[in-house]
Image (cartoon, rainbow, N blue to C red):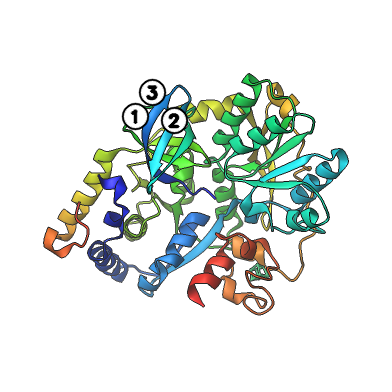
Amino acid sequence: MCLAVPVKLVEVDGDRGLAQFSGSRREVGLQLLDRPEAGDYVLLHAGFAIQKLDPQEALETLELLDEMAGLRDSELKNGI
Amino acid sequence: MVFDRLENYRDPARVAALRERIDAAACSLKRPLRLMEVCGGHTMAIHRFGIHTLMPPQLDLISGPGCPVCVTPGAYIDAAVEWGESCDGIVVTFGDLYGVPGSDESLEEAAGRGLDVRIVYSPGDALDIAERHAERKVVFLGVGFETTAPVVAATLGQARSRRQTNFQVMSAHKTMPGALRALVECGDSALDGFILPGHVSAITGAEPYRFLAEDYGVACCITGFEPVDIMQGILSLVLQCGRSEPKVDNRYGRAVRPGGNPRALELLRRTFVAVDSQWRGMGCIEGSGLDLSESWSDYAVPAPDPRLESENDVRCSCGEVLRGVITPPQCPLFASSCTPKTPIGPCMVSSEGSCAAHYRYTL
Ligand code: SF4
């Protein structure tokens, strides 16, 4: 029930925003975020954005893992 | 962009590399480990991606009490039905709770008798229902952990600013840390590590779990819901146990900051107070629930007394399953009389209950 999906904010208007995910758009509540902006990636749970996602962290996690495991791009189906 | 492509976190080569590391780390363990995933979302993901089948024999993955509807006691369902009948009101709920048995009947069965029950995806939708039916009373059934409670708090804020006075909440929200303390204290689940819930932690941060590592010596790792996340979390736990250096690690940095989401936490503080709460299978746990605070009393429908133990179906072993004492297949009714089509206990009703996850993905 704590399911939350990553979505991209495409419009922000006060406490309401529009999010895009898997081809569709829906309204999201932004009351729980500090200064949300269009272009931010957020976690969407039960109609509200509950946290901003950090793209830099997301990339670094994968880079670190690939480095540690000595994985090269050619071995990956889905590189970064 | 990395979030558009969750496959990054599902890449087979990355999962295989992590598996090798987990195997190697497990080899140097002095004894097998029992690792509990607390969150129902993790239970689902572990079964869906077959992560339990990748584990070396030294590691036992068990499911815990992190499916909110599974731990919601029958008395709460009874109270919701009673409220609806007493005022001919509209009962609005998340879908997960719809089929969960009360003492006599589920919301679904009550709806079959004519009770007005509506299923929504967001509490915001419940507020819209109240707006459309200004002449009737509407109650939203507030279940869920720290992930969901702020969303309900934000909806209450909207209700007040819209002066929507026919909208109320019956809060059975629960908080994780107290339940985890109860689990390690009761001892019968004998746990070495927790895979901590990613989205609860996105709100709370890591701090509330520190006592688990420091006072009880249990390894902890917060992680996300993709295979690479979960494998990284398990690796962290095995390494912590191997070195006997328990801590609260965070492998979900893209969503979880050390201090969580301060704005959501502030909203929780302004809207709720901590109260004792009844957990199905675990009893009444001190300070593990959230009730609306004094300033929101006009929006509150009281939940049943938390000391009230509900009459559960005596045949069902959900209590033991939720504490990780037995696995679902060890319940004599599993997959015989109890199936997702004919569920006997809440762990089979909810799609993320461990009995349902076992049934769907391992049979
Ligand atoms: S299999 Fe059914 S009866 Fe057995 S514990 Fe799970 S839900 Fe309860």
Tell me the tag on residue A38: 1
Label 1: which secondary element: loop
- Can you say whether A33 is above or below B99 in the image? above
Tell me the tag on residue A35: 3
Graded by Cα atoms within 10 Å as few (under 14), some (14 to 19) or many (20 or more), the crowding at tag 3 reads few
Q: Which residue is drawn at 29% across and 69% down?
A: B23
> Can residue B271 be seen?
yes
Picture quarter containing residue A78? bottom left
In the rendered image, which residue does mark 2 sit on? A17
**Are the residues under badges 2 and 1 in a single subunit?**
yes
Q: Residue at x 42, y 33 (%)?
A: A18
Chain at numbered mark 1: A
Residue B260 percent across, percent down from the top left: 43, 35
Residue B59 percent across, percent down from the top left: 40, 69
Q: Distance between the residues labelled 1 and 3?
A: 10 Å
> In this orientation, which residue lies closer to the viewer: A5 or B71?
A5
Picture quarter containing residue B24? bottom left
Label 2: which secondary element: strand
* Left or right for B93, reference A10: right
Graded by Cα atoms within 10 Å as few (under 14), some (14 to 19) or many (20 or more), the crowding at tag 1 reads some
Q: How far apart are marks 2 and 1 (CA)?
A: 8 Å
Query: Quick one: label 2 or label 1, which is nearer the N terminus?
Result: 2
Kind of residue indicated by mark 3: Arg
Q: How far apart are marks 2 and 3 (CA)?
A: 12 Å
Q: Dividing the image into 4 quarters, which one contains the N terminus of chain B?
A: top left
Chain at numbered mark 3: A
Task: For the residues labelled 2 and 1, say whether their Cβ atoms are less than 8 Å apart.
Answer: yes
